[in-house]
Amino acid sequence: MKKALFTFLFILSLTSYSQQILPESERARVVDEILEERFNTLLPQLMDETGIDMWVVISREYNEDPVLRTMLPATWLNARRRTILVFYRNKEKNTMDKLAVARYNVGKSIVSAWDKEKEPNQWKRLMELIEERNPKNIGLNFSKDHNIADGLDKTDYDEFMSHLPKKYHSRVGTAEQLAVRWIETRTPREMTIYSQLVDITHDIIEEAFSEKVITPGITTTTEVEWWMRQKVTDLGLETWFHPTVDIQRTSEELVGHLYSFSGRPDNMIIQRGDLLHCDFGITYLRLNTDCQELAYVLKPKENKAPDFLVNALKDGNAVQDFLTKNMVEGRTGNQILAQALQEGKDAGLRPAIYTHPLGSYGHSAGTTIGMWDSQGGVMKDDGENYPLNQNTVYAIELNTTVNIPEWKRDIRIMLEEAGFFGEDGFRYVNGRQTELMLIPRPKQQLSN
């Protein structure tokens, strides 16, 4: 009887999520439709803006270039053998060739341009395509500063250059700017989906940080982490990193930073009066979320969080505001970081900012605004020189240290929410946390 009741309650708990989540076949349709739109509308624009008229993407099965992974149709889970894609943009004629040096088409847009019976050598066929088009420049995916734009392995680079006619050698260069723009730029339809994705993420956190999952004095942080992981699996989704849940309370000193994993104890029993924090992200329709939120476990006779924790969260929101108002198109990550930190400190706060691009990957390519251990700036291209562009998404990740006299210690208010920067400036993709979640929910909240 108990098992049947548990099964019924579990299925019931999935209802609100499953209404939002597409079955696999529908997901594939949406992924492919978005990919076609990106190839046909976005890619020509990006090639014009970055000044690259031929982009060659080369990858082998199970050793995929991170960029190529985002270009494969939904039914391709990996590259096949050696996959070579050629994108050629003739701006003057307003034409765009999307070719595969493969025996078959790659999705709907990328057409096979290799008949192995006529030319058995794949590299020679690639060279024929290059010579037929005589590009002014050829972009390859190698980069010192942008790891996602550095997907061309040495073997394929050497093979490419050994077959390429000498007259084209001087035209070969890095495609890092184009690769980063491809990875970071979101279309309007993707942003509609992103709102739904963040909503699902918030829903899972809200359920995890509730009396449905947590019984004070019994439930451990590790159990909540695995509940979140299992919930994602049961919904037919994926996590791109293992969830973490941690505790701050009166009886312990603040140990290290959240990201010093070795200093974060496992299996802590959740008690009344604890401030809980989670770090959690999911993958859906080739997009990723990354979210950190907070909850307070009510003590007996409490129906709200203590004012000192409510005010501490407001300090965290203030740091978010200092950061996002400084997200101005054309500014580098280091410029945004320095200005936001200074304004936060001038307001009496103790901020730390480590905001990263979010999208096709969890830690994606684009403008990096600090790292938790680099608050003086990121000394590489994505933080030093790479500017903030429109139609990009970020994990607004940061913390502020707050002294709590009632607990005789400092705590950190650690927050992370998906934010979009577009034509009208910055906005949160689907809101942000401005109130602490309460465990258990007060009865008046449960009845609404």
Image (spheres, grey):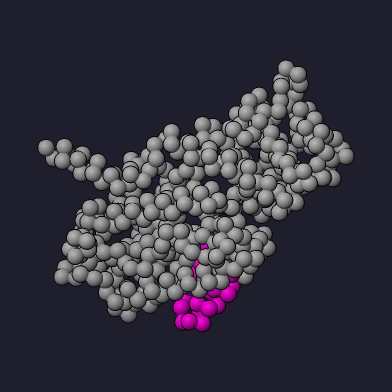
- Closest to the observer: 377 or 70? 70
Question: Compared to 186, does 234 lie above or below?
Answer: above
Give me the residue at 24% from left, 55% from top: 214
Quadrant position of residue 416: bottom left
Give me the residue at 59% from left, 45% from top: 38
- Residue placed farthest to the front in the image? 93
Range of residues picked out in magenta:
336-355
Quadrant position of residue 390: bottom right
Q: Position of residue 249 (x, y in %)?
A: 30, 68
Question: Compared to 396, does 81 lie above or below?
Answer: above
- Residue placed farthest to the left in the image? 1
Number of numbered discs overlaid on the protein picture: 0
Answer left or right for 31 relative to 334.
left
Q: Position of residue 280 (x, y in %)?
A: 40, 53
Whether residue 102 appears in magenta in the rendering, the answer is: no
Give me the residue at 57% from left, 57% from top: 391
Whether residue 344 appears in magenta in the rendering, the answer is: yes
Quarter of the image that includes the N terminus = top left
Is residue 376 visible in this depiction of the protein?
A: no
Is residue 123 visible in this depiction of the protein?
A: yes
- Residue placed farthest to the top in the image? 117
Quarter of the image that includes the C terminus = bottom left
Q: Position of residue 175 (x, y in %)?
A: 71, 48
Quadrant position of residue 83: top right
